[in-house]
Amino acid sequence: MAQKAKLLSADTVSAVQSESPFLKLGDVVYRILEQGILTLELAPQSKLRINSIAEKLDVSATPVREAIEKLEEGGLVIGQKATGSKYKTYSVFDIDDDDFQELFIIRKAIDGMAAYLCAQKNWTVDIDYLQKCNDEFEERLHSYISGKTTFIECRNSDRAFHKGLVEYSGNRYLAETYRQLEKKLDYLSIRTCEFVASGPKRDDLNILHIQHSSVLNAIKMSFPELAREAASTHIDFCLERSIKNRYLQSFSGL
């Protein structure tokens, strides 16, 4: 199982419990495993063995099973039952080309409409917050390019910007749809940043920030169609670069 040793340890359990003392143990384990998946410390397709995880966390198997089943419900873990077996085997979700295509389609629909609605009623939008997210995204991209941080930090600012668009859209059904897919979209974001960052062209990373700026400027100017178009262009670019660089990784054996 690919992981950093410090992730699955009793110390990690204690740290989470110190931060959130009223969490049930199953929710503590869930938070640890979810963080591992969304930071790629638990590698895509790696096996999640309940007894092994329980031993490393120094907890019983029950909260681990509860956490993994909850992760399965959210789509971050895949459970498979072998023919004739009563028990499932679990592994970390990975994104194949079909997943990329389908998730990006829904991202394009959500982000495009969110940007449109934000521009339509931009006086209800916290422009300063979105600007702050975008500025942090630019700063972290430059830090990554100079080797001072990881693409994980870039991803955090990226998600904050996109979540802000949905929140300020003012459409509760759009927000509800987003929440249902949030974990998979978070995972898609981390893999997108990974693949774009792995590409040979560093300019691709700067383009991401420029595209965010285009969306934000259209919202500021109250141009709904332009905002939707800018968001769609951004999502299309992310998809194209992700698939291209994914193949480059596979070809180079990375």
Image (spheres, rainbow, N blue to C red):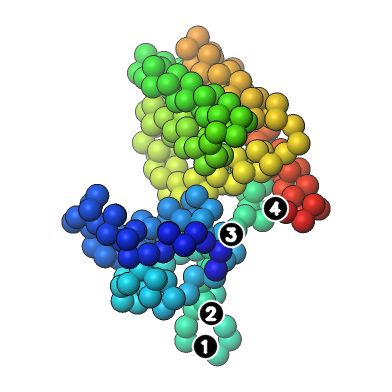
From the top left corner, tell me how far across and down residue 176 is, in percent.
39, 43
| Cα–Cα gap, marks 2 and 4 | 24 Å
Residue 94's spot in the image, x, y percent?
60, 58
Residue at point 38% right, 58% down?
Answer: 32
First of labels 2, 3 by sequence position: 3
Which amino acid type is shown beneath numbered disc 3? Pro
Q: Which residue is mark 4?
A: 97
In the rendered structure, find residue 81 and report the number of the disc placed on it. 2
Secondary structure, mark 3, is loop
Separation of residues labelled 4 and 1 (CA atoms): 30 Å
Q: Is residue 41 left or right of residue 250?
A: left
Which comes before the other along the chain, label 4 or label 3? Answer: 3
- Mark 4 lies on a secondary structure that is helix
Q: Which numbered disc, 4 or 3, marks the residue closer to the eye? A: 3
The front one of 110 and 192 is 192
What's the distance in space between the residues labelled 2 and 3, CA to CA? 19 Å
What amino acid type should be assigned to the residue bearing mark 1? Ser
Residue at image location 72% in from the left, 54% down from the top: 254
Please give the residue where the numbered disc 1 appears in the rendered image: 85
Q: Amino acid at mark 2?
A: Lys
Question: For residue 215, what is the image quadrant?
Answer: top right
Mark pair 4, 3: CA separation: 14 Å
What residue type is disc 4 on? Asp
Indicate the quadrant where residue 56 lies.
Answer: bottom left
Q: Is residue 140 visible?
A: yes
Q: Are marks 2 and 1 in contact (CB under 8 Å)?
A: yes
Note whether 223 is above or below 88 in the view shown: above
| In-image side of 13 versus 76 (left or right) | left
Q: Is residue 121 left or right of residue 109?
A: left
